[in-house]
Image: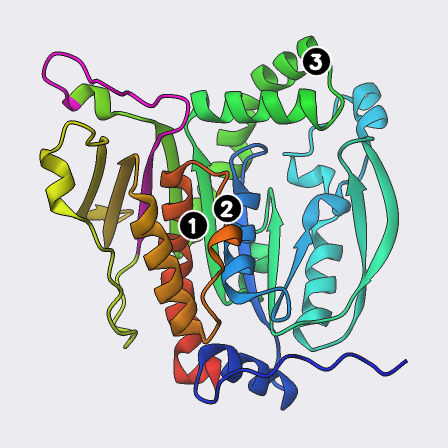
Amino acid sequence: MENAQPPRFAEGSLAHALRDRFDRGQRPLLVGVAGDSGSGKTTYTEGIEWLLGADLVSQISLDGYHKEDRATRRQSGASPLDPNANHLAQAAADLAQLQQGIAVDIPRYDHRQGQFLPPRRHTPTPVILIEGLHTLYPEFQSLLDFRIFVDSDVRVKREWKFTRDTQERGYADTEAESQIASRADEFEKWLADQQYAADVVVRIHPSTLGTLALDGVEDDCNDTCYHIEVIVTPNQLSQGSLYFPVDLSTMTRQEALPFMLAMIPSRFQGHGVNVLHVDGHMPLAALDTLENEIRQFIGKPAAPATTTASQALPPTIRFAQMLVAWPFLGHLATPTNAV
């Protein structure tokens, strides 16, 4: 059976440039995504992979570099958030090999069973997404081309982590509650400072639209809406325009849905940043248009209406996926990276 050939992309597109530079022997581009357990890291790695495509992107979880499995941690009392409970030096060495285009056996961890799996050989792709608790630690800084930190509000993180751990990872309710409580201080101690090394910081809060209503909001959308901050360091990349169409006439109708979009230039750790705020029911048709504009920039065909990315996600999360992906794609499109 003949080896499958990589797909062909339109000449001049970002996808074509990424594939071409890789085929000419240039190194893969490494993207680090860090954050607490249950913060939503996977949402953003999956969003980037969806937009660029699995033919250009592969993912690696650093969870396989934990030193102990779940049963052993119950006995030792160790926390995976502690950097000393992870083989970070080995992880950095493996990523350095991948960066040089060398296939590596990556250790794996099965969260459902709480056990390690046999390593899997990872062959480099044009873009490699690395997700983990400590991905922006100093050991990895020189290896990463782009850095994302995801920080969810305690209330959101508790809801997401409890649901995930009890429904997908086999934790009893009491054990999940105990772990959430014990790890609150560990996040601040071992993980939070990574945000200061990030190119983009994503903060996810419960919706705050109700605070803007006069005598109460008609649709507070608490179960499906989140208030998301995206903190971006301004750049001078020549990336072209990206339009988000909004039908203003819908705002005067009875069936109008609440949403908010704002951009506020701010200061963060002593330097200028742009902070984008999004909340509420983002118009779905506008999200589809925005996604297809990004795919056109990449050189990918428009997504079929029945397979639009992350349709099950709350619209603000889906919108934030694209907000996070856009500066990263601009970074890829710079001449030193894309060609």
* Magenta-drawn stretch, dominant element (helix, strand or loop): loop
Q: CA distance from mark 2 to mark 3?
A: 30 Å
Q: Amino acid at mark 2?
A: Ser
- The residue depicted at 73 percent of the width and 13 percent of the height is 172
The tag earlier along the polypeptide, 2 or 1, is 2
Residue under numbered circle 2:
310
Q: Dividing the image into 4 quarters, which one contains the N terminus? A: bottom right
The single residue placed furthest to the top in the displayed view is 174
For residue 51, above or below residue 87: below
Is 230 magenta? The answer is yes
- Secondary structure category for the residue under label 2: loop
| Residues at circles 1 and 3 in contact by the CB criterion of under 8 Å | no
Across and down, in percent, residue 298 comes to: 44, 73
Of badges 2 and 3, nearer the viewer stands 2
Q: CA distance from mark 2 to mark 1?
A: 9 Å
Q: Amino acid at mark 1?
A: Gln
Residue under numbered circle 3:
175
